[in-house]
Image (cartoon, grey):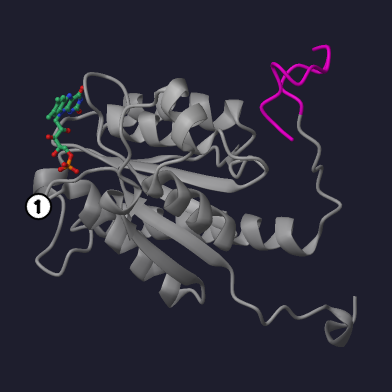
Amino acid sequence: MDEQQIPKHEEPMHFLVFSASLRKDSLNTRLAQLAAQVIEEKGGKVDFANMRDFDVPSYDQDVESDEGHPAGAEEFCKRLLANDAFIISSPEYNGSMPGLLKNAIDWVSRFRPQPFKERHALLMSASPSMGGGNKGLWSLRMPLEHLGARVYPDMFSLATAHKAFTEDSTIADSTLQKRFEDNLVAFKDLVEAAKHYPCIKKAWVEFLGEYPDPVTERVE
Ligand code: FNR
């Protein structure tokens, strides 16, 4: 195609980025901040959230029926809808995702339209362990995919993260830093393509043979 015919998309992609750790010196918050920096350097717009913005009580269906959604769930939903995609850097707790993150996802899954549906997600983790918290990300994929989020296949897990950062909070190993950046750029390109080329499949049904029923439906 003649270069002049290639459509130019000037509007930047918007990314919600947050760490699922509340800890002041969180390694995951450092990694999320580094991801935000790379996204902005590559021309994206970042909405950086603090997990405290999404603070919610333990999910209780009676509370939902009587009082509706808590403010933290409203905020999480609003920020998801306001962005094209989201990036989570999550600690691994006992081989799984932190309870507070799953609890927040459970609350948000109750909104209609259900905001995770068709939203692109990139998962990353940091841990002092050799596994980098990767096992926790596999558990996090499950509810997100269940809700129809498009979870990017390549997840980034920073092993021995307590020793991995330079003083200015980049990854000390330059090959690893490059791999981190390349992963973010590939994700950003996919989000951009999905937004501007809507021929990409949109419909989502978890089991194609499942009988449609409002009682079990997780999508509007
Ligand atoms: C951990 N940690 C941990 N690390 C890991 O790699 N696999 C695991 O299963 C666990 N389990 C676990 C449970 C609980 C309750 C805590 C508090 C911690 C260690 C964890 O990775 C480490 O504390 C990180 O520094 C936590 O992430 P932030 O807060 O630094 O982002």
* Residue 166 at x, y percent in the picture: 13, 62
Say which quarter of the image contains residue 135: top left
**Picture layout, residue 217 above or below residue 13:** above
* Residue 212 falls inside the magenta stretch: yes
Q: In what quadrant does ligand 1 lie?
A: top left
Which residues lie in the magenta part? Answer: 205-220
The residue positioned 26% from the left and 50% from the top of the image is 52
The residue positioned 31% from the left and 22% from the top of the image is 96
Residue placed most toward the observer, 51 or 163: 51
Tell whether circle 1 marks a residue whose Cβ is less than 8 angstroms from ligand 1.
yes
> What amino acid does circle 1 point to?
Asp
Residue placed most toward the observer, 197 or 63: 63
Compared across the picture, whether 119 is left or right of 90 comes to right
How many neighbours does mark 1 have within 10 angstroms: few (below 14), some (14-19), or many (20 or more)? few
Quarter the N terminus occupies? bottom right
**Secondary structure mainly formed by the magenta segment:** loop
* Residue 12 at x, y percent in the picture: 59, 75
Quarter the C terminus occupies? top right
* Residue 180 falls inside the magenta stretch: no
